[in-house]
Image (cartoon, rainbow, N blue to C red):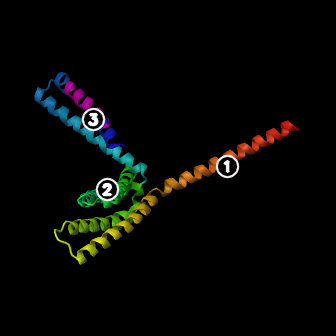
Amino acid sequence: MNPFISFVLRTLLAIPTAGFVWLISFFAFDQTLLLSTVFSIFSGGLMYYSAKAVMKHRFIKSQGLSRKEYKYIETNLDEAKQKIERLNKALFSIKQLTALKQNMEILRISRKIYRITKKEPKRFYLAEKFYFYHLDSYVELAEKYSFLAAQPTRNRELNQSLKDTRRTLDEMRYALEKDLDMVLSNDLDELQFELDVARKNIDTFRHSEFLDESRRLK
């Protein structure tokens, strides 16, 4: 579920609960204003976090994961988020217009893989190469390139190192595209299956129409 919608639903459950408990405490049980407010806040908070726990449990179950698996994936996603932020910082510190398009594409693909996996954690296993190898390599290379490109003086060796690093970054972009394809592989397979079914139905319909037309002509 969308995090914002989830937050709104939990809030909509917590606020009425807190209000109801306050009214009951103050009027029905004749508690003081302070105690009624304390009970109200506690009850609202309890409802909020209980709803959060239930939603999280249902979400994990819908993904076909155990709590241990989800925790493992969640930890890796948190680390990946920090790496993508480092990647963003490194790439956009490179003041080269010729590299801008490539850098934006690298970030776009990286963020898309992350968003898809965040929304559907079960896809994490399809993107293990991205999370454990390619993302780390990209961050290290981008930070290295950013550092070298920022040096005030250049020599032949430094220029060659920059050129080699840029070439490697460009080659690794194709690896990222493969990672994205892998994450989307199930969707592509399902789409192809649906297309095959649709084509078969169309062929069946056309054949039926042809037979009906042949009978009418006879």
Disc number placed over residue 35 in the picture, else none: none
- How many tags in the picture? 3
- Classify the position of the C terminus by image quarter: top right
Residue 13 part of the magenta segment:
yes
| Mark before the other along the chain sequence, 3 or 2 | 3
Asked if residue 32 shows in the view, the reply is no
Q: Is residue 15 magenta?
A: yes
Within 10 Å of the Cα at label 3, are there few (<14), some (14-19), or many (20+) other Cα atoms? some
- Check disc 1 and report the residue beneath it: 200
Secondary structure state at the residue bearing disc 3? helix
Circle 1 residues within 10 Å: few <14, some 14–19, many ≥20: few
Residue with the most extreme right position:
218
Q: Which residues are magenta?
A: 9-24
Characterize the local packing of mark 2: few (<14), some (14-19) or many (20 or more) Cα atoms within 10 angstroms.
some
Q: Viewed as shown, does residue 143 lie left or right of 134? A: left
- Which of the two labelled residues, at mark 1 and mark 2, occupies the earlier sequence position? 2
Question: As shown in the figure, which amino acid type bears the numbered disc 2?
Answer: Glu
Name the residue beneath numbered marker 2.
Answer: 74
Q: Secondary structure at mark 2?
A: helix
Q: Circle 1 — which element?
A: helix
Image quarter of residue 54: top left
The location of residue 31, given as percent across then percent down, is 14, 26
Residue name at image x 22 percent, y 69 percent: 148
**Distance (Cα) linking label 1 and label 2:** 42 Å
Disc number placed over residue 11 in the picture, else none: 3
Q: Nearer the viewer, residue 5 or 141?
A: 141
Query: Which residue: 25% across, 31% down?
Result: 15
Q: Position of residue 3 (x, y in %)?
A: 32, 43
